[in-house]
Amino acid sequence: MSEKKKNRIWLLFINIMMMSSTANSGYAMISVMEKVLVKRLGLLSEEELSDCTAMAQSSPGPVAINSSCLVGYRVAGLPGALAAMIGCALPPIVFMILVTAFYQFIVTNSYVALFMRGMQAGAVALVLNFAIGLFTGIQKKKDLFLWILAAISLVYIEFTGFPVYYLALFCIATAVAKTFLLKKKEGAEK
């Protein structure tokens, strides 16, 4: 393994571990990933992170672990995926061990309750930042198809009681169909 790849793996592990320590929510962590991994370190592009995020959301399991694993794989292959996954999982595990050890003190402490309320407000801001980033990504592509799919998804989520995986399957099927039709049209023009 090259020295450059080892450095990328360590960068992933350390940075994702720090992100997981401070942003213990999947969507909040993705917003921080964009700032650190895309803008500051330049390990991947916004589009690559967006693709990894979309795959992470549509696969079973926690979004933070899924996205970390996919980002790690994208940046440094299988070793990067393992390093990112361990870096993401380690802080919550340590945190839960500490919470369990001091549970009685934590649930009765008014300062801890205030701290948790403050963290909720911060998490809302991070998730909102992530949603705005997704919105800007769709806006930059100027693709009517994406807007229609987003509108259908919003209506589906708000007004039906059906599971979200049906929506995911629908979005995947329509995206595949669109790609297939575009390729077929390009082939016919040549």
Image (cartoon, rainbow, N blue to C red):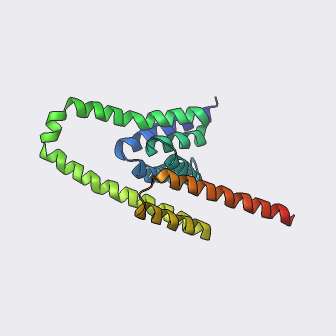
Name the residue at 57% across, 52% down: 51
For the C terminus, the image quarter is bottom right
Name the residue at 49% across, 49% down: 57
Residue 53 located left or right of residue 158: right
- Name the one closer to the observer, 6 or 77: 77
The percent position of residue 77, horizontal first and vertical second, equals 61, 36
**Residue 108 visible to an observer of this rendering:** yes
Residue 138 located left or right of residue 87: right
- Whether 46 is drawn above or below 68: the answer is below
The percent position of residue 65, horizontal first and vertical second, equals 46, 40
- Name the one closer to the observer, 179 or 34: 179
- Name the one closer to the observer, 171 or 28: 171
For the N terminus, the image quarter is top right
- Whether 155 is drawn above or below 80: the answer is below
Which residue extends farthest front?
161
Which residue extends farthest right?
190
Count of numbered circles in the view: 0
Name the residue at 62% across, 59% down: 174
- Whether 31 is drawn above or below 11: the answer is below
- Whether 16 is drawn above or below 150: the answer is above
**Residue 143 visible to an observer of this rendering:** no
- Name the one closer to the observer, 38 or 106: 106
The percent position of residue 12, horizontal first and vertical second, equals 50, 39
Residue 115 located left or right of residue 180: left
Residue 41 located left or right of residue 125: right
The percent position of residue 156, horizontal first and vertical second, equals 47, 62
Name the residue at 61% across, 67% down: 145
